[in-house]
Image (cartoon, helix red, strand yellow):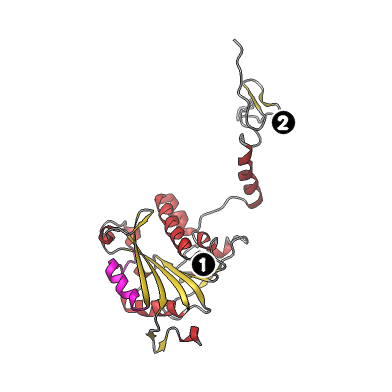
Amino acid sequence: MTRRTRPRPNGLRQSPRAGIEGDGKKPVRGPQGGPSLRPRGTVEPQYQHCLDVQKETGFARFGYMSNQMWHEDPKKILFNLARYKFVAKMLKGRQAVLEVGCGDAFFSRMVRQEVGALTAVDIDGIFVDDANAHQDPRWPITCFVHDLVERPVPGVFDGAYSLDVLEHIDPRDERRFLGHLVASLAPTGVLVIGTPSLESQRHASPISKAGHVNCKTQQQLETLLGSFFHNVFSFSMNDEVVHTGFAAMAHYLFAVCCTPRSVPVGGSRCLARNRA
């Protein structure tokens, strides 16, 4: 009986003795020096683009924070990607967006893809330096050290977001923090806040809970943000799923805030600079 081989999509034929043949390419040698069934290119030609991109740009790398997630709890990568995707959808089309608390900025590219320009700040220079050291010129992000409790970020932005930051802000400083954030928004600006729920903390891991001094229920978050914005729209999140279900069972809370109020903060009105 004659053994037949199935033609490959790229015109190569597989031979049990000769490795790869049919297009003039030499067979790729296996680890023992014998022929390998692996061609020099991909079996399906459309996937050759994956190799071309790697050859042109190299392999992407994680930052300090995302690397820790990948090595110790890989599913957190998915949770964070989902959070940033939600932000990207909410702020799509905005021309100047501010991120407060960017960390290593690994996930920030998802938002950068949907907006005109992205400025990202963090209080920790180690993570900011890492983010800047691995910038991709195709997805430029202006990234620098800044403490929003101390002062607003220079400039005016039509969108802003802050994920996993508010719970680290001392309750005594939360109004100053939010006031300075609103001061950086245009009058038509949109703010997205994301934070773990107070109810979730009994289930959180030690590294997740470390530094959490200001977690809130959804109602508490709405009340706080409602003093800075005329409109606050609340969402819940469990794992990577965003929903509008029962907030007390949510592990994570989102608030989309629109129409900033003019609120006195530290002796000045937080929208005065934008309206001048």
* Marker disc for residue 25: 2
Q: Residues within 10 Å of mark 1 (few under 14, many from 20)?
A: many
Q: Is residue 247 magenta?
A: no
Residue in front for this viewpoint, 192 or 38? 192
Residue 170 visible in the shown view: no
| Number of numbered markers | 2
Residue 213 placement (x, y as % from top left): 31, 69
Q: Check the image and name the residue furthest to the right.
A: 24
Could you say whether the residue bearing mark 1 is in a helix, strand or loop?
helix
| CA separation in Å, label 1 and label 2 | 47 Å
Tell me where the magenta segment starts and ends, as one range: 210-228
Horizontal side of residue 62 vs 268, given as left or right:
right
Query: Residue at horizontal 40%, vertical 84%?
Result: 262
Q: Secondary structure at mark 2?
A: loop
> Vertically, is 42 above or below 131?
above
Q: Residue 155: image x %, image y %?
A: 53, 79
Which residue sits at x=26%, y=57%? 249
Q: Is residue 161 visible?
A: yes
Residue type at tag 2: Lys
Position of the N terminus, as image quadrant, is top right
- Observer-side mark, 1 or 2, equals 2
Q: Which residue is mark 1?
A: 128
Q: Residue at x 63, y 48 (%)?
A: 53
Q: Position of residue 239 (x, y in %)?
A: 36, 53
Q: Position of residue 52 (x, y in %)?
A: 65, 46
The three-letter amino acid code for the residue at tag 1 is Val
Does the CB distance between marks 1 and 2 fall below 8 Å? no
Closer to us: 234 or 30? 234
Q: Is residue 212 magenta?
A: yes
